[in-house]
Image (cartoon, grey):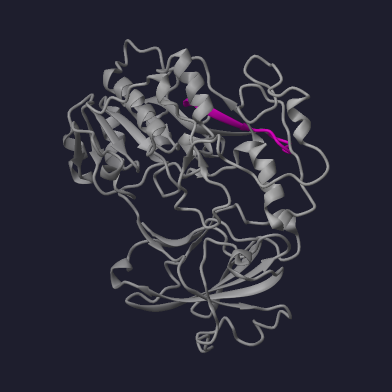
Amino acid sequence: KFQIQLLYADPRYAGWTFFLGRDVPQCHSGLYDELSRPRWTEKEMGWLKTGPVPPVTTEAVALRTNTGSILNIAPELQLWNPGWGLRTNREIGFYYLQGGYSRLDSLLTGWSQAVGVSEEKITTLPENSVLLTNVLTSAMVSFLQGGGRVFLLSSRWPGALTSEAHMFWADAVFVPPVGPLGKSDREKLLRLQMFDLTHDKTEAIPVARLGIDTVVGPMLRLFRIHDRRKVGVFDQLFATRVGKGLLVTSSLSHSATAGQWLLSQLLEWAVSWKPGQSNFPTTRMSLEKLKKLTVARTNQILMLNKDWHFQLDPDQQGEANGWASIRFNDVKWPLIQAARIWEGQGYSYDGMAWYRKWVQIPAGFRGRKVRLVAEGVDDAYRLWINGEPVAVYGSFTDHDKTVFMIQTETDLTNHLKYGGKNLFVLQVVDLFGGGGINRPIYLRIE
């Protein structure tokens, strides 16, 4: 009801509201509850009728201020209830990676027994100890092999199991009746999954695409069933055995109260886990398979989202006019930000447009593998580096081949001038709907 009323309240959808319902039990956005009872009676659904609905109100909903959203149409919803009496144990002793792709110490405020360790010191950790990390490195594989326990907070970055943005409304959610959480806690996990545990990121691990869906024990699994010929399988929480050790992985958010509680539950279990006495997980991932998912060391990331020179090209004359050339002067072009559709930046437009950006490439990158990663471009694009065509992704005419939610990678190692500025040009075509470099774009240096 809240989401549907938001559509009424948003002037962009004035006159049209599409109501999507689904009847998957065990999903708290479905029409039926866990006991297969209708979630709303006919009388309670009476508000859904032809005609205007007053603007949405949120007095009865607990709120958390959303500071990361570009369009603050809706606040973040907080389902956590202090009355549940759940305890967060921050006195657990474990290690966490210093460095990596993000600062874990900011997540661990108040965890007095957590000890930071650098990548170089991982091989010196005691056997059977627990390491919280945001990247899987070669040293951690050896640590697991000897009996260590690794808790990975996944992300899109290399060596972090490439968790990706996910739209949960298309999924059936499965929380199996096994694992470290009791029945009551599993029910709360299910309820919190679409709220507190995804309040600042909505990501899932594509376990089927990675080829690991049968070698991990899911604690929170998503089956993508909407409008699909083949069911997609994603995990937000799983565990598996590796060597003598234990690998736990989460793509959930652990910054809010609910996330901290879940983190403490899982860490406490990992600390007490014994390979010969624990029934869960029953799955095992081979060292060979895990090594394919790791990196030798944390990759360096150079974000490119900020300040691209931008120009519409409705007549598709940009290429003929030299807009991909290093000699073209784009100083009069307006600036636009990547990782946002251009409609959200004042351009109500479908068609062709151009992005240009000069990027300083450090001399220290020479001898390393450098890749351009675009997490999503709506709908297709052609890439030039220093005036030379390098790659094409998607289709300029067939929307079914859009790459707006598909990560594309281009090896630029042999196309760059190290120690100098390099011109990056994207010729983008938007067939309809939102358009542009709609998701993050960056260089990955291995």
Q: Examine the rendering and report whether any part of residue 244 can be seen.
A: no
Determine the residue located farthest toward the right in the rendered image.
Answer: 50
Q: Residue at x 40, y 17 (%)?
A: 180
Membership of 293 in magenta stretch = no
Q: Residue at x 53, y 56 (%)?
A: 375
Residue 381: x, y in percent? 62, 66
**Magenta-highlighted residues:** 215-230
Q: Quadrant of residue 167?
A: top right
Determine the residue located farthest toward the top in the rendered image.
Answer: 277
Along the line of sight, the residue nearer the viewer: 148 or 352: 352
Identify the image quadrant of the N terminus.
top right
Q: Quadrant of residue 279?
A: top left
Could you tell whether 436 is left or right of 81 in the image? right
Residue 425: x, y in percent? 54, 75
Relative vertical location of residue 77 with respect to residue 277 in this rendering, above or below: below
Could you tell whether 271 is left or right of 302 in the image? left
Residue 150: x, y in percent? 31, 32
Along the line of sight, the residue nearer the viewer: 2 or 428: 2
Residue 385: x, y in percent? 50, 75
Q: Quadrant of residue 419?
A: bottom left
Relative vertical location of residue 48 with respect to residue 13 in this rendering, above or below: above
Could you tell whether 369 is left or right of 219 in the image? left
Could you tell whether 79 is left or right of 27 in the image? left
Q: Residue at x 60, y 86 (%)?
A: 322
Q: Residue at x 31, y 12 (%)?
A: 276
Membership of 223 in magenta stretch = yes
Identify the image quadrant of the C terminus.
bottom left
